[in-house]
Image (cartoon, rainbow, N blue to C red):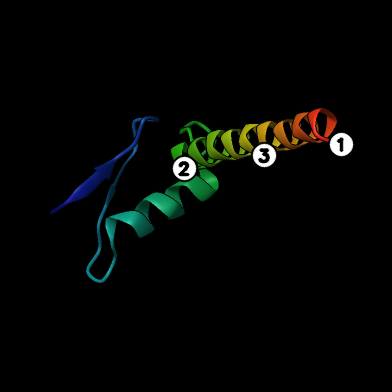
């Protein structure tokens, strides 16, 4: 039998027809002790995208001021 172990100490067996990802997704919907790494990763990517966009806007504004 295969199981998925979680940071909270829980272990959930993988039933026939289930995938590891579906077990993880199901567990994270109700467990408030396990960090949702996907969500943290997405937040980090959003922050990087925001900083990149701000840099591009600042660069365009600087360029517009230098070459009106």
Residue corresponding to mark 3 = 53
Asked which secondary structure carries label 1, the reply is loop
Say left or right for 48 vs 53: left
Whole-angstrom CA distance, mark 3 to mark 2, is 22 Å
Decide which of tag 1 and tag 3 comes sooner along the chain.
3
**Which label is found at residue 57?**
none
**Compared with residue 59, is residue 12 higher up or lower down, i.e. above or below?**
below
**Which label is found at residue 38?**
2
Question: Residue 67, image x and y in percent?
Answer: 80, 34
Residue corresponding to mark 1 = 68
Asked which secondary structure carries label 3, the reply is helix
What residue is rendered at 86% in x and 36% in y?
Answer: 68
Question: Given this view, does label 1 or label 3 mark the residue nearer the observer?
Answer: 1
Question: Given this view, does label 3 or label 2 mark the residue nearer the observer?
Answer: 3
In this view, the residue farthest toward the front is 67
Whole-angstrom CA distance, mark 1 to mark 3, is 22 Å
Question: Residue 15, image x and y in percent?
Answer: 25, 63
């Amino acid at each position: 039998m295969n199981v998925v172990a979680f940071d909270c100490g829980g272990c959930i067996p993988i039933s026939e027809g289930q995938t590891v990802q579906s077990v993880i997704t199901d567990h994270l919907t109700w467990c408030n002790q396990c960090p949702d790494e996907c969500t943290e990763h997405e937040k980090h990517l959003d922050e990087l995208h925001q900083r990149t966009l701000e840099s591009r806007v600042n660069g365009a504004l600087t360029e517009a001021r230098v070459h009106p």
